[in-house]
Amino acid sequence: MRIVNQLLVVAALAAVGGGAWYYTQQKPAAGPTPQASAPRTAPPMAVETAAVESGIVVDVVEAVGTARAREAVVITPKVPAMVKKISFTEGERVRANQVLVELDAREIEARLEETRVMRENSQRLYDRSTKLFETRNVPQSRVEELQAQLEAAGARIRADEARLADYVIRAPFDGRMGLRRISLGALVTPGVEISTLDDTSSIKMDFKVPENALRSLQPGAKVEARSSAYPGRVFTGTVTTIGTRVDAASRSIELRAEVPNRDDALKPGMFLTASLVVDTRPQALLVPEAAVLSNGDNHSVFLVADGKAKQVPVRLGQSRDGKTELLAGVNAGDTVITGGLVKVRDGQAVRSMTASRPQQPTS
């Protein structure tokens, strides 16, 4: 009986405890309801930034060109004859009108001497006839006939002198002789190469540039030329001539520049690389190359405005020395993100690590 009473007491206590638990779970607690805790805000992302700078940008067009002598000619004879004398040495500098080669002209010299004798005789006959005409001993027709013979003899002399000049080959301009192609006593004919003569005091360089550079091209523009034969050396010249036609196939125009060559370093026919300045922008907007994001032909940068990242499209210009020119999309003094761009999103709160660096004390 005592055991039954104990079980009843345990059951009663369990019922009272269960009811109390149910009551506390179902009934709202007394007093004001606690508010839900506010969501936590992510801290600004640390990024590296740089200011949009204003600087000078120079547009340079590079092309390949060929060196040509200022003046160049192949020395050849006008008449067939034997080489009588060679008056130049290979590689020698010669002056204009200097004798280079003399050909055997004995036949033409003899003919010229004969013509001069005939002219002297015609002159004596003419002088005598004019005196006799004054005394009416010679008719006027005879005087006129002798005068015609005298003039004809003079014309033959001039023709023979011109032919004789063809037997003496002279330098047409100042320059340097090339290799000698003939020997003393050789029979030469018109067209046979004796040597070459080049004026290399300055070099002509012909090269082509795209037609879109035409707006900035003008004679006198500065050109820099480089050759693989002289690494690190720059030859400076100026544009002298702009072609009159644009090549329809390549859409390019040919230019000719003149480059001083006082030490004869450049030789005709050499391959040269030309650099031509076609435009200069003194107030160009420049940013570090790392600030530019590219997706195909689309380019953009992230600006920092009011503590947030703002992605803006830009148009690119020249890139050089780690800087990229922006033609549109930003202003001088704007702040662009250069580091941490992988995780940055448009509108995201950012903090510049550059700005947060402690300043050094001023002494």
Image (cartoon, helix red, strand yellow):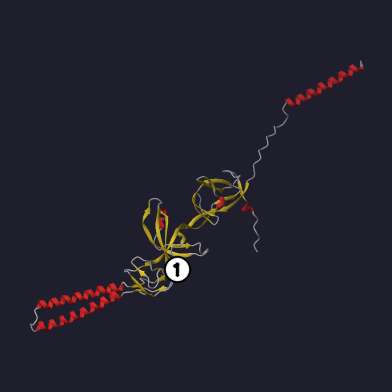
For the residue pair 192 and 338, the one nearer the viewer reads as 192
Q: Quadrant of the C terminus?
A: bottom right
Establish if 76 lies above or below 4. below
Q: Nearer the viewer, residue 182 or 200?
A: 182
Q: Which x, y percent locates residue 318? A: 49, 54
Depth order, front residue of 294/1: 294
Residue drawn 24% across the image and 78% down it:
114
SS at circle 1: loop
* Left or right of residue 88: residue 55: right
**Mark 1 burial class by Cα count in 10 Å: few <14, some 14-19, many 20+:** some
Q: Residue 279: in sight, yes or no?
A: no
Q: Residue at x 55, y 46 (%)?
A: 310
323 to 86, vertically: above or below: above
Which x, y percent locates residue 57?
A: 49, 57
Could you say which quadrant of the image residue 13 lies in?
A: top right
Residue 116 is situated, as x and y percent measured from the top left of the image, at: 23, 78
Front residue of 238 and 346: 238
For the N terminus, the quadrant is top right
Residue 293 seen anywhere in this rendered image of the structure: yes
What is the three-letter code of the residue carrying label 1?
Asn
Q: Describe residue 77's horizontal placement relative to residue 347 as left or right.
A: left
Image vertical order of residue 224 relative to residue 300, above or below: below
* Residue position marked by numbered label 1 in the rendering: 261
Is residue 44 toward the left or the right of residue 11 in the image? left
Q: Position of residue 276 (x, y in %)?
A: 45, 59
Residue depicted at 35% across the width and 72% down the height:
82
Can you name the residue that lies furthest to the right here? 2
Count of numbered badges drawn on the protein = 1
Give above or below for 339 relative to 11.
Answer: below
